[in-house]
Structures are given as structure tokens and as C-alpha cells.
Image (cartoon, helix red, strand yellow):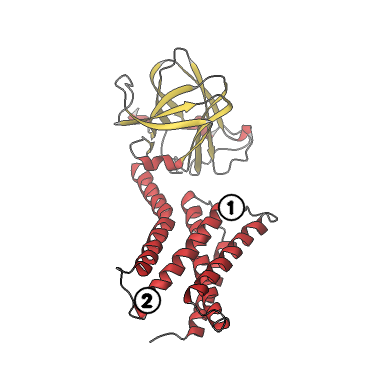
């Protein structure tokens, strides 16, 4: 049973309105990288549906003026793209942030859905033949764009699954997915095969961080498994090939951090040349804020950084992990 054109447009309008309301009103508690990516990915189907709605209106209202089928598709593409650009421009004047990548997601959805619908029409009209370029190109375009649109969310799902299965190991640099949790400012991170003189390291790979000359050069791990309450130490293996002792600052935050220095754990590691295992008592982290206790079930950031260095500083890191007292 085929839907009438009017009913199909009503369904598309309903889907568009629902997606629009969800994306613009839903505020998830404790927003994570995964939920942000899923939320952002919603731009693709929303503007893809909008393009199909505009295509339907074009055919209903301009059928006598636009004789060629491709003209309706082009009009739908440009109209939907204009609305996507306009929505981002308007956000400049609102509390929300305009984002060029949201516009890219919009256009990806517009092209993918229009190409997909063109292929569907060919199939419905028994003109579907992948050997024809005007069928093959839209089909492949739709598939590639839709796969590309969902790939970031799939990668984040894999990263979260791996993070949870590795716990209480927080980062061992064995998988490239772990770098998705890392933010770098004036710094560079590479995965290296474990050098033989990095005696404390245990796996096949280690992370090599180059802190570059800057006021602050940062290596930040966001969103480790948040509940540290059953453990006693945060440990990490570090290796310095520098000729002299260097200072690495450590900053640890929970989700309730108020952005003040006194509301987090702060320490400085004097790292001598060679291989070392550094352990931080979680009691020291818990009691670090001056006016409260750190919430050890809502830990959020591990931050290593240098301050005011004049030349690059390189260290290797491995096995950032939580440990219990009996295992030390």
C-alpha cells in the first residue's frame, strides 16, 4: 500500500518537527563525548528530511514551472542548504554556538537523503540499474555519506566499550581509540613501541608526549571511568630521556569542579631522567579541595602539563591506572 503524497509529507513534517524539538530542547545530564556526538549527528537526518519535504513542496507547487526532475532536486538542495546556513548564522546572536561542522552535517544529510530518494524512486519505477551512472553515482554517494555521518558515533561507542572493559586501567596506549579521550594544547601525542630502557612500562606501546614551548602545554584525559571509590592509588609509569630533572604539573578534577585552583587536586612531579612509577594517594585527591571533598564517584579529568617552558620537553607515559593498597 502506497502512501499518498500528502500523507507522506505529513509524516516527514512530523519527523522533522520531532527531531527539531529533540535537538533544540533535550539537555542530557552529565553530557559525555558520546551523547554530544549522537546529538550532533542528529543534524544529518533532520536536514535530510527537510530536503525531502522541500522536494515534495516543489513538486506540488512548481510542477507546471519546473518540468525537469533534476530541477526539483536542485531547488530542494539549495533551499535546505540555505536554511541550514541561516540557522547557524542566527545562533551567533543566541547563547548557543554557531558551528561550521553542524552546517557540514546538514549538507551531508541533504545530499544523502536526496540521493537516496532518487535511487528509491528509480527502484519504485523499475528503473533501478546500478550499471547506469545516474543510478550508481547517487546510490554510492548516499551510502558513503550516511556511513560517514554515523562513523564518529560508532567509534565513540567502541571507545567507551573498550574504556569500560579495560578498567581499572585508564590508559595504556595499546589502542588508537584511547586517543579520542585526549585533548592536547601546545602538545603532541604519538604511540611508540615500548623502548627497552622504559623498565616500568608493561605493554607493547607507550604514549610519547611532547610538551611544546608555551605558557601552558597540556595533556588532558577526559572522561575516565568515573567511579574511583573502590581504589587507593592513581598510578602511572613515566620515562624521561631529558638530561636534567623536569617538572610536570598534575591536576585532577571531578565533575563538580568550579574552575577555581582551590577546588581540585594540584601537584608537581619532579621527574628525573629514567623510568619511574608515580603513585598518588586517592585520599590526597579526595581531600584536595579546600571547601569540600572530591566526589570519587564522579571523577572527570586527569591533566598533565608544563608551565612556561622555553624548549620542547618529551616524556613517555604508560599504564595510567587505579590500584588497591594490597596490590602495591
Residue drawn 36% across and 69% down?
Answer: 135
Q: CA distance from mark 1 to mark 2?
A: 35 Å
Q: Is residue 171 visible?
A: yes
Q: Residues within 10 Å of mark 2 (few under 14, many from 20)?
A: some
In the rendered view, tell whether residue 26 sits above or below residue 155.
below
Q: Secondary structure at mark 1?
A: loop
The extreme top residue here reads 243
Q: How many numbered discs? A: 2
Q: Secondary structure at mark 2?
A: helix
The residue closer to the viewer here, 13 or 301, is 13
The residue closer to the viewer here, 201 or 209, is 209
In the rendered view, tell whether residue 20 sits above or below residue 244.
below
In the rendered view, tell whether residue 283 sits above or below residue 195.
below
Q: Which residue is mark 1?
A: 99
- Which one is in front in this view, the residue at disc 1 or the one at disc 2? 2
Residue drawn 45% across and 42% down?
Answer: 181
Residue 251 rendering spot, x and y as whole percentages: 54, 31
Residue 184 rendering spot, x and y as whole percentages: 50, 35
Dot placed on the residue nearer the N-terminal end, 1 or 2: 1
Q: Which residue is mark 2?
A: 122
Residue 42 rendering spot, x and y as whole percentages: 50, 61
Left/right placement of residue 177 relative to residue 12 reads left
Q: Is residue 28 visible?
A: no
Q: Residues within 10 Å of mark 1 (few under 14, many from 20)?
A: few
Badge number at residue 60? none
Asked which quadrant contains residue 65, the reply is bottom right
The residue closer to the viewer here, 32 or 79, is 79
Quarter of the rendering occupied by the N terminus: bottom left
Residue drawn 47% across and 76% down?
Answer: 69
Residue 141 rendering spot, x and y as whole percentages: 40, 62
Quarter of the rendering occupied by the C terminus: top left
Q: Determine contact: label 1, label 2, CB under 8 Å.
A: no
Amino acid at each position: 500500500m502506497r502512501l499518498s503524497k500528502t500523507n507522506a509529507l505529513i509524516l516527514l513534517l512530523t519527523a522533522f518537527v520531532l527531531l527539531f524539538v529533540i535537538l533544540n530542547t533535550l539537555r542530557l545530564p552529565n553530557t559525555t563525548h558520546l551523547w554530544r556526538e549522537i546529538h550532533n549527528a542528529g543534524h544529518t537526518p533532520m536536514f535530510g528530511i527537510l530536503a525531502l519535504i522541500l522536494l515534495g513542496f516543489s513538486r506540488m507547487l512548481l510542477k507546471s514551472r519546473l518540468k525537469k526532475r533534476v530541477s526539483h532536486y536542485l531547488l530542494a538542495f539549495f533551499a535546505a542548504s540555505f536554511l541550514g546556513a541561516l540557522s547557524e548564522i542566527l545562533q551567533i546572536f543566541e547563547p548557543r554556538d554557531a558551528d561550521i561542522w553542524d552546517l557540514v552535517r546538514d549538507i551531508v544529510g541533504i545530499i544523502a537523503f536526496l540521493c537516496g530518494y532518487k535511487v528509491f524512486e528509480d527502484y519504485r519505477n523499475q528503473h533501478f540499474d546500478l550499471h547506469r551512472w545516474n543510478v550508481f553515482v547517487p546510490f554510492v554517494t548516499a551510502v558513503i555519506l550516511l556511513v560517514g555521518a554515523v562513523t564518529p558515533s560508532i567509534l565513540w561507542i567502541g571507545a567507551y566499550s573498550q574504556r569500560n572493559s579495560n578498567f581499572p586501567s585508564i590508559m595504556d596506549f595499546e589502542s588508537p581509540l584511547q586517543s579520542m579521550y585526549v585533548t592536547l594544547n601546545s602538545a603532541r601525542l604519538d604511540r611508540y613501541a615500548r623502548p627497552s630502557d622504559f623498565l616500568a612500562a608493561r605493554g607493547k606501546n607507550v604514549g610519547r608526549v611532547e610538551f611544546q614551548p608555551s605558557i601552558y602545554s597540556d595533556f588532558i584525559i577526559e572522561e575516565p571511568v568515573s567511579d574511583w571509590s573502590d581504589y587507593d592509588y592513581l598510578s602511572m609509569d613515566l620515562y624521561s630521556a631529558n638530561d636534567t630533572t623536569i617538572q610536570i604539573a598534575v591536576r585532577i578534577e571531578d565533575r563538580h569542579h568550579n574552575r577555581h585552583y582551590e577546588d581540585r587536586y594540584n601537584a608537581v612531579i619532579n621527574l628525573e631522567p629514567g623510568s619511574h612509577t608515580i603513585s598518588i594517594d586517592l585520599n590526597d585527591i579526595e581531600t584536595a579541595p579546600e571547601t569540600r571533598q572530591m566526589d570519587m564517584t564522579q571523577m572527570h579529568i586527569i591533566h598533565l602539563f608544563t608551565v612556561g617552558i622555553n624548549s620542547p620537553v618529551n616524556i613517555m607515559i604508560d599504564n595510567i591506572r587505579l590500584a588497591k593498597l594490597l596490590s602495591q
